[in-house]
Amino acid sequence: MDHTPTDLPPAPIKVLLADDQALLRSAFKVLVDSEPDMEVVGEASDGAQAFALARRERPDVVLMDIRMPGTDGLAATRMISADPELAAVRVVMLTTFEVDEYVVSALRAGASGFLGKGAEPDELLNAIRVAAAGEALLSPAATKGLIATFLAQGGGADPATSAASAGMHAERLAALTVREREVLVHVAAGLSNDGIAGRLEVSPLTVKTHVNRAMAKLGARDRAQLVVIAYESGLVRPRVE
């Protein structure tokens, strides 16, 4: 007779900490390990070490400092995003200020979102859970910062790169349905699924389905990538208020 329990609790969220400040890592480790649904599986002091540990430990979420000596957080995030074996790993960037000058670069590199180092403990824990669930961690302030950065940079990278990127995204956008495009515009505005559902008078589950389909068609890792694609493709244009 099979006595295997069917109601086992879910496995804890595996978290990798990457920051060159040992004191900060220690504080984060104590906080994360105090939660029953998550555990720290590794600590890195630079980006190269973070990538190596990510390959070894297969964390669900990496808390990645942007600025580290040697291989920085941006480079490490690109390495993680480019590795097919790490496709399920989500990176949350830690910034000194929530709206950081590297917002666009980090999103392009594959980050799922941002968190200020001065965030409250509950915010940090929530960020880990949100990222582990596959959602993007883009607060309204971070989204506004993203738009402002696009404005300041004229859309992001150099003109040649931007044009090529826009062309590629425009081709993919052609595969979206009218409703998927509509949802994408709202995602780029920083609205949650519930917020979009309210605007479109549909259920949040319906919105989630549209978002997931748009991500699949556009080759986006997560919601944060959708924001970048919406701007780079020209589907959404920043407005100067």
Image (cartoon, helix red, strand yellow):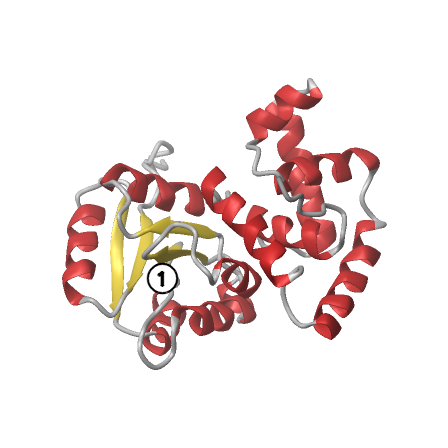
Q: In this rendering, would 121 be left or right of 140?
A: left
Q: Quadrant of the rendered structure where residue 209 is?
A: top right
Establish if 90 lies above or below 205: below
Visible residue check, residue 128: yes
Establish if 50 lies above or below 169: below
Quarter of the image that includes the C terminus: top right
x and y, in percent, of residue 186 in the image: 66, 35
Q: Mark 1 — residue?
A: 64
Q: In this rendering, would 199 be left or right of 102?
A: right
x and y, in percent, of residue 233 in the image: 75, 55
Query: Nearest the camera: 3 or 28?
Result: 28
Residue at image point 32% right, 57% down: 96
Query: Nearest the camera: 36 or 240?
Result: 240
Instruction: Kindly give the residue lying farthest to the front in the view shown.
Output: 241
Establish if 5 lies above or below 62: above
Visible residue check, residue 136: no
Q: Quadrant of the rendered structure where residue 5 is?
A: top left
Residue at image point 72% right, 71% down: 159
Crowding at mark 1 (Cα within 10 Å: few <14, some 14-19, many 20+) = many
Q: In this rendering, would 19 be left or right of 206?
A: left
x and y, in percent, of residue 151 in the image: 62, 54
Helix, strand or loop under label 1? strand
**Amino acid found under the numbered disc labelled 1:** Met
Quarter of the image that includes the N terminus: top left
